[in-house]
Amino acid sequence: MTDSKYFTTNKKAEIFELKAELNNEKKEKRKEAVKKVIAVITVGKDVSSVFPDIVNCMQTDNLKLKKLVYLYLMNYAKSQPDMAIIAVNSFVKDCEDPNLLIQALAVRTMGCIWVDKITEYLSEPLLKCLEDEHPYVRKTAAVCVAKLHDINAQMVEDQGFLDYLWGLIADSNPMVVANAVAALSEISESHPNSNLLNLNTQNINKLRTALNKGQIFMLDCLSNYNPKNDRKAQSICERVTPQLSHANSAVVLSVVKVLMKFLELLPKDSDYYNMLLKKLAPPLVTLMSGESEVQYASLRNINLIVQKRPEILKQEIKVFFVKYNDPIYVKLEKLDIRIHLASQANIAQVLAELKEYATEVNVDFVRKAVWATGRCAIKVEQSAEHCVSTLLDLIKTKVNYVVQEVIAVIRDIFRKYSNKYESIIATLCENLDSLDEPDARSAMIWILLESFLEGFHDENTQEQLTLLTLVQQMLTLATQDSDNPDLRERGYTYWALLSADPVTAKEVVLSEKPLISQETELIEPTALEELICHIGSLASVYHKPSNAFVEGSHGIHRKHLPIHHGSTDAGDSPVGTTTATNLEQPQVIPSQGDLLGSLLNLDLSLPINVPQVSSMQMGAVDLLGGGLDSLVGQSFIPSSVPATFAPSPTPAVVRSGLNDLFELSTGIGMAPGGYVAPKAVWLPAVKAKGLEISGTFTHRQGVGWILESSLTGVIPSTPLAIHTPLMPNQSIDVSLSLNTLGGCEKQYRCLLLQLPQPTQCAFVEGGKMEHQVFLATWKNIPNENELQFQIKECHLNADTVSSELQNNNVYTIAKRNVEGRDILYQSLKLTNGIWILAELRVQPGNPNYTLSRKCRAPEVSQYIYQVHNSILKN
Amino acid sequence: MISQFFILSSKGDPLIYKDFRGDSGGRDVAELFYRKLTGLPGDESPVVMHHDGRHFIHIRHSSLYLVVTTSENVSPFSLLELLSRLATLLGDYCGSLGEGTISRNVALVYELLDEVLDYGYVQTTSTEMLRNFIQTEAVVSKPFSLFDLSSVGLFGAETQQSKVAPSSAASRPVLSSRSDQSQKNEVFLDVVERLSVLIASNGSLLKVDVQGEIRLKSFLPSGSEMRIGLTEEFCVGKSELRGYGPGIRVDEVSFHSSVNLDEFESHRILRLQPPQGELTVMRYQLSDDLPSPLPFRLFPSVQWDRGSGRLQVYLKLRCDLPSKSQALNVRLHLPLPRGVVSLSQELSSPEQKAELADGALRWDLPQVQGGSQLSGLFQMDVPGPPGPPSHGLSTSASPLGLGPASLSFELPRHTCSGLQVRFLRLAFRPCGNANPHKWVRHLSHSDAYVIRI
């Protein structure tokens, strides 16, 4: 009898058949029937209708049958809570069963049933099980507390389950301890402010003694601990180092993480420090012998490690030879690491390999190899010559994608070593016809024009004129014939710039080009430090901070590497200390004052708009709030501080820290009452290596929209100079020279901001429709284009609504009163000429409005609704 | 913690689906995973994928996908370890891992999962512990026969032939037929080495490394003690020296946590009391300095006439194994320029075969004796765009897309590191039964043996 035939049944009668079999007298038959049911569940069919019959089978002393029944119950208990109640008596009975398997089974399953009635019954047997003599029951019960907390947190806290869990931490059985710790940490995560996982020195010692059990969790806890001096750090390192040869890669990585963190605390010249560096290499190399999945995850981590401390693996570059049968994702990672490890000593070997790789079959891999060759030229200056000749060899292969990639890469080399390799332009030009990829084409254009510009003064007049004519033609083409708004606007920008202010234009266009640097491909130092603290976790595989992909309480905490205190530093303080937070606060407020002052100076005619000031005050409140939170919250996770306002020991963080938070405004002012959308982040810091740009558009009656923006991470040496309001579709290029605290100007050069067009800014004036036209249009638009929305919690009356909206170019055409409700008919027009008709129903006393919209282009409605909603709520 | 676990067949059909936390999307997730996996661009890795707050981590094993999902920033390594451990466990309990065995044993698999994971937290993965809890018996497709020699191979190792021991005997569930004690007294001990080599086109050795494992599959009652004696000259690390000879040296060794190393320092003896089922006793690796010459050397010569598109490749393969040894299932794989159509060949012996497959030349040599030398002359036509004006002479510069050559082979009774198992002694004496069968096998096979041309 095999289970596979259960997959094939597909009839309606099947359920009846199953029911009959489930009620069969023979135990064996019933068992087979339950097996069948379980197989059916796996194929995705609904067999919840046999629930009562299954529950009947529950009353058996046959362990095999019972286990099968519980398998079924687990599956359906959560989705069919009402039916699960039928089983409650059997549950309670099984919880007291002398057979510990049945006892544990019952407790385990009951925790998965989301019915209060069941949990009431659960609490008493659960308390007994937590004290059961058999560890199997205790460990199951410990997990069950976490389940119960998920269903009914109050009950867990009231009935003292947490004390039981703390008791289990000292259990003799490691599995019970592990489950208790897991349960406690899960519970404490749902209460970020509670003091459940109190990691004081005493508990740390407890965890350290438990290290022999090789628990990754314990190692992770340890890495969150900040030892008070280097001796202590060293003693922890000594304890964990033997675990480096553990067979489990997860343990190895956790140890590596602890060591990477504590290396920061050790004096750099000590013998122990150097020995530790040596010890780190072999386990990392061993990881490369695993399955390709493990290899990939390891490579991602090694990538971080070599960026932070290349010295660890500098002797081991051979390990990252690409194997012929590696999966492509492993190959690409290995290439990346080879580039990080490339140095003058091994560059010849690296280049020889890259050249081989460039002849392989896989296109992605070949491109990456070519790209890597270019990186080498930029990273190791002595090798540039060699790299360029390798690249030229590759061009000769005439393989289309190789040639294109080579040309794109050579552009970067030109940027680093200008005036050095111009001789190869001729070779590049031979391949002009084969270029069909945008990147390669643009690189080629750049190279050619750049070389013309270099020698512009030496050319004769005719050539100079030709070039100028081309510029003229290009601008015309871009502004008049192009359908791409980005292109058109850029074109207009240059045109306007040239015609209005040639001096500025010269500054913008002919400014000194910063050198391209090898660091462009590295992870930004702050982010790298954070990722190092997440070695062995998903964050380290994605190379993204965990708050980028995990929701919930983890998101607000950012980890960073500890500071070297030196051996005299006292205090067992968590990273991100109280004092640091306190120090930071006074600096916040003066800088705010300065900001206000500078805003006033900047302002030309009208007073500063009110909403902006209030939003800044909001910012201040946030800052203080964040600070306080961190004071309260630090006892819980020691190394965590609130993300944005992290007072950090490293200069990298300080750069983007509070000190530099400043705002710029070019506000000419605005009509009071108009809605200002809260500033949105247009360019998140993660993408722009620490530079953050946020801004909003404000509306000024009769004029247009004003750009407000703030930048974080840099200090402007001159204020942002946009003195005129921007009209829709108008584009202004602004030159803003920025000073950074670190030497990182180069990173920001190629920054092209594409601002999302705020929809409310797109409402144009003159969107008022004639009464008759409105009626006709309303009827003309088919009903399926009508969309209804609810605007909730709005406490304005119809008249204020109407004037509020009028300020934002939404015009009320007519107003009716039907059965005590006000109905407003409104129209508005978008910059692109789309008309939108709306009907807004306002009922006095009811804060929820109904908004119906009709428009020929229904896809815009959703956005309009959002704007409507936000206008009315402000 | 883990939200879900599922097993998909190679076509993406769910075979097993288990939701541990009830907090995430239902079984559509399995389908979503497969869609995402198949739609992934070439330069992105499928190992860890992220979708809508959920992370998919998977391994491929015996053409099945074993997948876990989680919504937390957990260690992907522990999940990968767990998955491969689960694969072994399922193999132990169901006999072997495959679409057929899984769907025959759905109830057993669920029961196992239930004990291995609770609420997404790992409880235990030890075969021994689980034996106390698991009630369902494995359903096997056909009775095993010790004399079934038709499909011979090592368990676990993905090689086709070893002609040493009947491996189907090793692929049976550890727990099946509880009553039938007599069949169980067998131990399989394998020393398996994977050899990766990279040889530059000028013949110089760029890289060589050996990754070895000692694997044990025991059908003896759990806890029966055994002692494994390794070559006495075995030494670890670059500095250590043992005996008078050059010694058998490896760079790194790691042992399973159950191995008792009391006698390792003095006599190179590993003592352990293995649980039933499969276990990797020791892992080791060695790079750069091999004690013996490489098993194969290839001497290629390429003649290419760009003008006529005629490509001639002469390959001479020398096997440097000791003359007693032989290599089996040798296959040379040589990627050819795009569009190669015809192939004419002259091979040095009749049992060889060569053909064009997937744009590459495949040269099969079923058996190569140590010390022998084989050769093949291959002529092909490469159509495609005529190159730059032909010089009318055949040039030796190889055309694009040719090479590198890669070799795959098996070397039975041979370890590249020289490591041997001297003895396997069992303390266990079954009452009334014959001595347990002990199978000790040595095997090396190629991982990536690449010769650039």
Image (cartoon, rainbow, N blue to C red):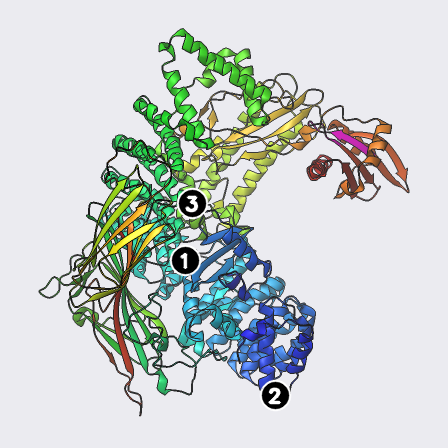
- Residue on which the image places disc 3: A530
Q: Nearer the viewer, residue A695 or A643?
A: A695
**Sequence-earlier tag: 2 or 3:** 2
Q: Using the numbered discs, state the Cα–Cα distance from disc 1 to disc 2 in whole angstroms.
A: 47 Å
The boundaries of the magenta stretch are A825-835
Which residue ends up furthest to the left in the rendered image? Answer: B244
> Is label 1 on the same chain as label 3?
no
Q: Using the numbered discs, state the Cα–Cα distance from disc 2 to disc 3 in whole angstroms.
A: 62 Å
Q: Amino acid at mark 2?
A: Lys
Q: Amino acid at mark 1?
A: Phe
Residue B187 showing in the rendered view: yes
Q: For residue A821, which quarter of the picture?
A: top right
Q: Closer to us: mark 1 or mark 3?
A: 1
| Residue A239 x, y percent position in the rendering | 31, 59
Label 3 chain ID = A
Q: Give the label on residue B406, or none.
A: none
Q: Using the numbered discs, state the Cα–Cα distance from disc 1 to disc 3 in whole angstroms.
A: 19 Å
Q: Which residue is depicted at the point 67% across and 79% down?
A: A17
Q: Nearer the viewer, residue A678 or A5?
A: A5
Q: Which residue is depicted at the point 66% across and 75% down?
A: A14
- Residue on which the image places disc 1: B77
Q: Which residue is depicted at the point 31% across and 90% down?
A: B433
